[in-house]
């Protein structure tokens, strides 16, 4: 009877230890799975942030190129207008100057002819 009782006691203890091990292993697997999920979420977060920053940088550099080209266009257009206005003034000044010189030469020629 002692042997039987000891064997039953051993089997009972064995079942309890197996059940405890099973519960602990399940807990450890769930904790490991939760850590894995947390790590995966963190990696995804960082990848999405990096992708968003790269997209923003690309859009920002594109906007800068467009702005630079538009400013260049405005500057060239303003320079062309200034050149056109300067040529207009030069043309009129030369015309006035030439007419005044011609009138002065005519006046001198008339004065010489009258003498």
Image (cartoon, rainbow, N blue to C red):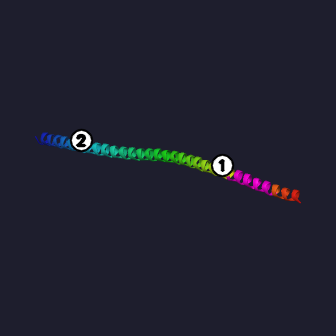
* Residue 60 placement (x, y as % from top left): 49, 48
* Residue 42 placement (x, y as % from top left): 37, 47
The quadrant in which residue 19 appears is: top left
Q: Nearer the viewer, residue 81 or 47?
A: 81
Q: Residue placed at 59% from the left, 46% from the top?
A: 73
Q: Nearer the viewer, residue 92 or 100?
A: 100
Q: Which mark is residue 84?
A: 1
Looking at the image, residue 34 sits to the left or right of residue 74; the answer is left
Look at the image and give the residue range highlighted in magenta.
89-104
Q: Which mark is residue 22?
A: 2
Task: Give the mark nearer the N terminus: 2 vs 1.
Answer: 2
Task: Residue 2: say if magenta.
Answer: no
| Secondary structure of residue under mark 2 | helix
Q: Residue placed at 76% from the left, 53% from the top?
A: 99
Q: Residue placed at 65% from the left, 51% from the top?
A: 85
Q: Nearer the viewer, mark 2 or mark 1?
A: 1
Q: Nearer the viewer, residue 31 or 48?
A: 48
Give the quadrant of the N terminus: top left
């Amino acid at each position: 009877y002692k042997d039987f009782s000891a064997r039953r006691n051993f089997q009972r203890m064995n079942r309890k230890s197996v059940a405890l091990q099973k519960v602990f292993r399940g807990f450890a697997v769930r904790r490991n799975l939760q850590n894995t999920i947390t790590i995966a979420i963190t990696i995804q977060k960082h990848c999405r942030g990096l992708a968003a920053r790269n997209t923003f940088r690309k859009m920002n550099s594109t906007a800068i190129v467009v702005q630079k080209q538009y400013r260049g266009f405005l500057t060239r257009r303003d320079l062309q207008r200034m050149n056109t206005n300067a040529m207009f003034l030069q043309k009129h000044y030369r015309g006035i100057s030439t007419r005044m010189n011609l009138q002065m030469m005519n006046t001198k020629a008339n004065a010489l002819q009258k003498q």
